[in-house]
Amino acid sequence: MVIIEDVRKAQRTEGPATVMAIGTSIPPNCIDQSTYPDYYFRITKSEHKTELKEKFQRIFSFPFYTFELKNAVYDAEDLVDEIAIEALQSKVEAEYPRGKQSLQDSVISTFTSFFDRGVNSKLEKMIGMLDHFVKAKDVLGLREVAARKWSQTRLPTTSLVDESCVYGRENDKEEIMKLLLSDGENSNKIDVIPIVGMDGMGKTTLAQILYNDGSVDAHFDKKAWVCVSDVFDVLSITRTIIESVTGLASDAKDLNLLQVKLKESLGGKKFLIVLDDVWNENYERWDTLNTPFRFGARGSKIIVTTRNESSVASIMQTVPIHWLKELPEEDG
């Protein structure tokens, strides 16, 4: 068995390489040093490759990898900010030059001086560091997964909730309930109420409790629940709302036909729609989805749950955002 302390004491190659295995190097069984320049491999037998990989995964475990990667990304962001600040300063100095330099010459001179002060070496170091993480990813066996596939691993939410298992959030429920049951107190015909909070804070649960409240049932003519997630598909969302408010399945694939149908279903009626787990930051998509809602009666409401206050909630909101805070321990 290879002991880690022995590995650390083993001979190193030139440069900042880390020894990952010891033994007599036999070319047919060696991992190409140029492939992983930050790690030094010396392997005697084929079975040592398996041991090496297991050891590598123990030392550079996934949590450690992600921690270091996150730090590297933060450093990269700091460097980008540094360059952006310098660019802004260069622009100001160029607009108000002290001498007779032209605007173009001033900008070029300032940026050349800036990069001569070491930014170029920082960029090269950062690129090398990120390249190192890409290679480490391969050794750890991590695979690139399309962002859309992530949502497919999550079960969609529904409007059903067992309230006997829910504790706390009475104040949140009361505050939002006042908004839901109010009619025409502002200039908006239809109010969009964003519920914002970190993952696991209970946004969906709170929306479910409100959706199933008896006073809400009595107040609204139509209700619909849609789990949106990261793919803001206007056609699919519209179809789901139609099926909810009419009770009839629809296989229509034309957005115009669906929106006309939804307009007819909601026209002159007071409705409540919950859009759960919204990630969309595209105002045009939201505006398209919102068009049929404008034909509903005054006092209609839309609840949007999201983690993203800076873009999602600000795009859709018509009333102040309701922030979900962490529950006190006695309420958790």
Image (cartoon, helix red, strand yellow):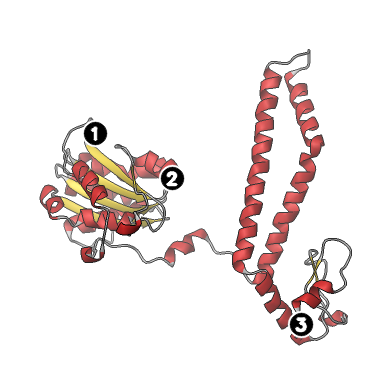
Tell me how far mark 2 sits from mark 3, CA to CA.
Answer: 52 Å
- Nearer to us of marks 1 and 3 is 3
Q: What element carries label 1?
A: loop
Mark 3 lies on residue = 2
Secondary element type, mark 3: loop
Residue at position x 23%, y 44% in the image: 175
Amino acid type of the residue tagged 1 in the rendering:
Asn
List the residue tagged with mark 1. 188
Q: Does residue 203 appear in the picture of this structure?
A: yes
Q: Which amino acid does label 2 sit on?
A: Glu
Query: Disc 3 residue type?
Result: Val
Task: Classify 10 Å Cα crowding around label 2: few (below 14), some (14-19), many (20 and above).
Answer: some
Rounded to the nearest angstrom, the CA distance separating label 1 from label 3 is 71 Å
Tell me residue 131's x, y (percent): 72, 57
Q: Residue at x 26, y 46 (%)?
A: 302
Q: Is 293 or 22 nearer to us in this picture?
A: 22
Q: Tell me if 136 is positioned left or right of 235 in this view.
A: right
N-term-proximal mark, 1 vs 3: 3
**Would you place residue 314 above or below residue 216 in this image?**
above
Name the element at disc 2. loop
The image shows residue 111 at horizontal and vertical percentages of 76, 31
- Relative to 330, is 38 on the left or the right? right
Q: Are marks 2 and 1 in contact (CB under 8 Å)?
A: no
The residue labelled by disc 2 is 281
Residue that protrudes farthest toward the left in the picture: 218
- Separation (CA) of disc 2 from disc 1: 22 Å
Residue at x 65% of width, y 34% of height: 84
Tell me the crowding category of disc 3: few under 14, some 14 to 19, or many 20 or more residues within 10 angstroms, Cα based. Answer: some
Rendering quarter of residue 46: bottom right
